[in-house]
Amino acid sequence: MRARRNPYVLYALSLPLILAVRYSGGGIFCWACYNVLFFVAIPLLLARLFGFSGKEVGFRTGNRRGYRVAFILLMATVPLSIYGTTIPSMKDYYPIFSFSGPLDFAIKELAMGAIMLANEAFYRGILLMPLAGKNRWLAILAQDVPYTLAHIGKPGIEVPYSFVAGIVFSWLDLESGSFLPSFLLHWLGSAFFDVLCAFT
């Protein structure tokens, strides 16, 4: 079977799932479910059908170095987050959910965690890692372009920021062998920014 273990075919079949997530409706909890379905369950099934194991698409713990670098990068983004709160379009947009109090806020941040885990699993796992075995930089750009385009409609500064972040996240995860370091960096950084926007 020619398509067996073909990362290009897996990539092409996975791309339409981005539109399925983008045009899914409902509140944050429904959106989290759609993300897990279209960015984790279905693409992971596709990967297995094409002969890629979960570990080959980043579903593994990874090495400690990746987590150490992620922590350093997280600390480095703190000043950027603080600066971001001075940009009206950013502070008006985030957090993307309404909340009735601290507990409701925390529960919805957990839903955001599920969404970001699904996104990292898809972009830095399914789209990136099989292709990286063929061509590392092609793989980084191939996942980064749709990742950046998915940010259109958010505050304008996020588009170039997401392009740079997508490259950094990809490098980090390829070095680690797992998408978990970028997930932690992405989620914790986002949650910190949400707290700044919501409570300052």
Image (cartoon, helix red, strand yellow):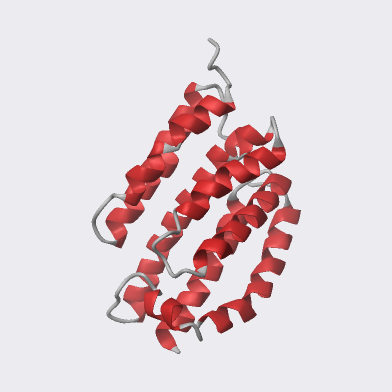
On the rendered structure, is 35 left or right of 79? left
Choose between 1 and 42: the one closer to the eye. 1
Asked if one can make out residue 59 in the rendered structure from this viewpoint, the answer is no
Examine the rendered structure and indicate whether residue 129 appears above or below residue 150: above
On the rendered structure, is 147 left or right of 99? right
* Image location of residue 95, percent across then percent down: 39, 74
Asked if one can make out residue 104 in the rendered structure from this viewpoint, the answer is yes
* Image location of residue 35, percent across then percent down: 38, 49
Residue drawn at 50 percent across, 26 percent down: 48
Choose between 58 and 153: the one closer to the eye. 153
* Image location of residue 40, percent across then percent down: 44, 41
Question: Which quarter of the rendering shows the C terminus?
Answer: bottom left
Residue drawn at 53 percent across, 10 percent down: 1
The number of callouts visible is 0
Examine the rendered structure and indicate whether residue 35 appears above or below residue 73: above
Examine the rendered structure and indicate whether residue 47 appears above or below residue 191: above
On the rendered structure, is 24 left or right of 185? left
Q: Which residue is the extreme one toward the bottom? A: 200
Choose between 72 and 128: the one closer to the eye. 128
* Image location of residue 125, percent across then percent down: 56, 42
Q: Which residue is the extreme one toward the top? A: 1
Q: Which residue is the extreme one toward the left? A: 26
Residue 42's quadrant in the figure?
A: top left
Residue 97's quadrant in the figure?
A: bottom left
Examine the rendered structure and indicate whether residue 29 appears above or below residue 58: below
Residue drawn at 70 percent across, 48 percent down: 176
Residue drawn at 52 percent across, 22 percent down: 50
